[in-house]
Image: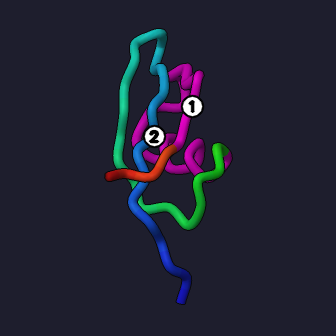
Amino acid sequence: MTTTTKYVIKYKLNGERRFEFAQLQSNSVEEAKQALAKIHDASDEITDINVSKAL
């Protein structure tokens, strides 16, 4: 079983700053993009992704 850690993903959605919490295996931007793609429409522009460990 893979272990996950709670991370905060800071990003811009269509130019508006947002953040989400997610259980990820690592703090990779690619994994964060996949998590964000699940909750937003394909037409949404997601930029400036930053992943850090939640406190």
Binning the other alpha carbons within 10 Å of mark 1 as few (below 14), some (14 to 19) or many (20 upward) gives some
**In the figure, 44 relative to 8: above or below?**
above
Q: Residue at x 37, y 51 (%)?
A: 54
User: Which x, y percent locates residue 16?
Assistant: 40, 12
Tell me the element at label 1.
strand
Figure colour scheme:
rainbow
Q: Residue at x 58, y 53 (%)?
A: 27
Specify start and end residues of the magenta stretch as a single range: 30-51
Q: Residue at x 37, y 25 (%)?
A: 18
> Residue 45 falls in which quadrant of the image?
top right
Residue topped by disc 1: 49
Residue toward you, 52 or 21: 52
User: Which x, y percent locates residue 14?
Assistant: 47, 13
Q: Which mark is residue 7?
A: none
Residue toward you, 55 or 2: 55
Counting residues from the N terminus, which is met first, the one under dot 1 or under dot 2?
Answer: 2
Determine contact: label 1, label 2, CB under 8 Å. Answer: yes
Q: Residue at x 50, y 22 (%)?
A: 44
Residue topped by disc 2: 9
Tell me the element at label 2.
strand
In screen coordinates, is 27 left or right of 44?
right
Q: Is residue 45 magenta?
A: yes
Q: Is residue 24 magenta?
A: no
User: Which x, y percent locates residue 24?
Assistant: 50, 61
Q: Disc 1 marks which amino acid?
A: Ile
In screen coordinates, is 52 left or right of 30?
left
User: Which x, y percent locates residue 7?
Assistant: 43, 53
| Spatial separation of the CA atoms under disc 1 and disc 2 | 7 Å
In screen coordinates, is 38 left or right of 18?
right
Q: Disc 2 marks which amino acid?
A: Ile
